[in-house]
Amino acid sequence: MIIPAPLVQLIAGLTLLVALVFGIIVQASLQTAHRRGAMSAVTRQSTILCAALSLLYVVTTIFAMVPGALHVEEPPILVVLYVVADGLSFLCAALFWHLTQLLSSPDGQPRRRWVVLSYAGAALMTLLAVSVPDLASEAPKVRPWAETVKWSYILVMLSLTAWHVGRNARGSGWRPGSLGTVSRSDFWTVTLAAACILTMLVLHFFGSWAEHRGLLTFLGAVLGLIIAIPFAARSLGAVLAGLLMALGLLGASGLALGIGIWLGDRLPVELRFLAPVATMVGLLLALGPGQPLLQEIVERVVFRRSRQRRADLLRSFRRLSPALGCGECSHRALAELVRVLRLRGAALLLSDGTRIAAGDIDAERIARRWPSGSTAERLFDRPHYGDDDLPPEVHDTLTDEDILGVVPVLGSSRFWGHLLLRTDLVTTIYRDEDTETVEVFADQLAVLLDAADILTRAVAMERSLAHSEKLAALGELAARIVHDIRNPITAAKSLSQQLSREEGPDAELHGVIDEELDRVERRVSDLLRFARRDELSLEPVDLAALVRETVGRLRGRLDGAGIAIAIEAPRTALVSADREKIRHVLINLIENSVDALAGHDTERRIMLAIVEQNGTSRVEVSDNGPGIPPESLEHVFDPFFSSKADGTGLGLAIVKRTVEAHGGRIDARPNPGSGISFIVELPAGRRSERLER
């Protein structure tokens, strides 16, 4: 069968395109693995498979360019290429099956016997391909049956692969960097590839290779394009950029050769030696200085990306002042990251529970499924771009939310949280320069947050000093007032008690006087306690045990009020503190929540949580009560400020002074929905103290 030359060139171009696509995917994977120094099992298997497919389609391109007469004569070198192509086909089928087993296995460890059987089958089929030429020379009818067995084996392997992919498919489409996840699109792609193999099998059964050479080679190219789609879709940016660069360089090289030929035909004889010189100069320009220019054109015209992305991001940080605070700085920085890198969305999940988002991403929904505390910090202690082995629940979260990258934000003295990136298929992060830019952004953001936190603490310290001066003045005044009114109150109470013993019509009134004098005396005692300077007896205290003990003492009152209380704490949390003073702090905060829940009609809950982080032990006391109005929140620790009808406004002021006397701090924050949380931070006990005492 004679195939027209244009059709031969088209088929060769298709097979070469498939080889180029797989080669680009392999190059991108190897560059990423080289930079990170690691490669997951799925990525490694995918890279090997793509390398084998690229080599297979290079050989197929050679087949397409070989004249039909040589295929009939079958010279030895062509026979060797046939065997190589068959061996690569069987190897690719086994690698595809192995990859499917990796993806479908819950623990990422496929059954060894299935893997061994698949590679053993590929080896046996390769031996059959090696022996076919000798057998065909003696019995020509052997070749059609051998070809039928070959394509039947590949069809069976692809069908099994499609079955496993269909069983484990998640979602309907592809997303960038999702090599570790199979979707229904993968299932239909593998099914279509199996249908293509079936068509080739039918053609082999009803005719010889020579009869259908052109159609079979074309179907082979189509098969390669079908198989390339799932891999290319997951790194579409890299594939498109690589293809455009390759086509651009081929076009520039062809133009240089064409100019050389044109000059050779038109220059005078004595100047025709300039034609090859011009060709060489053109090729050097195309393959040398022309590459950066072509890359600039591709990124600007096709992807609308500037090569100055990192510089643009760093300039945006100069416009951010730490005085804006951590939240506002993060909001503005994320918005710039999304704009400059043309991301679909980005989110920042801070370790204190704050969620900040920019673009199309639901940070609240992600945070509900995100691992908490040290678990997330341990899993993502380095940048992740979809090629790490992660627990199934974490992997599912990233897959469902289309998260391409997770980058830790590490400050000089604390872990801030994680930066999450969401992209689409085309504007995906596909170059090492992009990932380096994101990581530089995370580092700069950490520096900015460190500065904002230091500034916030400095301002808080100034306010605390001013507050302390105010408290000192109020304490001195309170001490004088208590001294002046305590004796008259005692005398009045003594006289009232004497009068109440006498029978008469005013006996009930004397009882009222006693109650009111008792109430005044309690207020005077509060004032005296507020005025007295705290004298601390510091010792190693197990904060977790103290919280459990304090809650146990208050359990009866809480049950009587219909309040459910829960404790989330480690086994031990050692701090250097005055046990009784901290106990009073806990009792005050719990009773404050009990009072807030008194008029609450729905389920009443109090939650106590202890977290050890960055050299501190943090106790959080939260409730689901009505909360505190925003305009009153900043005054809750001021003396004589109270939202209760019968409150003195000294309880939280005393709590604040006690906590600060321990070198800690206390803060009040509204809860999402309803209620309020009081966060007490105390310096953690040093290891040497734990051993000595």
Image: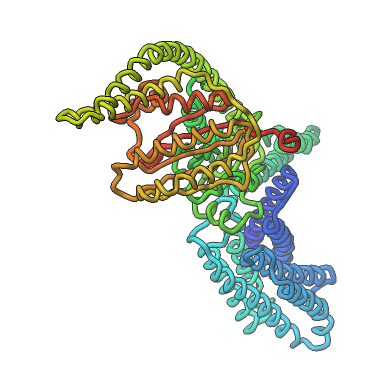
Q: Residue 104 placed where, x, y %?
A: 61, 67
Give percent across and percent down for residue 412.
66, 28
Q: Is residue 160 left or right of residue 367?
A: right
Q: Where 168 sits versus 400, above or below?
A: below
573 in relation to 521, above or below: below
Where is the C terminus found, in terms of image quarters? top right
Quadrant housing residue 411: top right
Q: Nearer the viewer, residue 428 or 221?
A: 428
Q: Which residue lies at the image location 33% right of the left edge and 26% below the top edge?
A: 631
Of the pair 617 and 113, the residue shown nearer to us: 617
Asked whether residue 675 is in view, the answer is: yes
In the figure, 42 relative to 421: above or below? Answer: below
User: x, y percentage for residue 142?
Assistant: 76, 86
Q: For the N terminus, which image quadrant?
A: bottom right
Asked whether 599 or 219 is in front, the reply is: 599
Residue extending furthest front?
502
Q: Is residue 84 left or right of residue 616?
A: right
Q: Quadrant of residue 649?
A: top left
Q: Relative to 437, is 601 above or below?
A: below
- In the image shown, does 259 or 41 lie closer to the viewer? 41
The residue sitting at 67% across, 58% down in the picture is 42
In the rendered image, residue 443, in percent from the top left (x then y), is placed at 63, 31
Visible residue check, residue 294: no
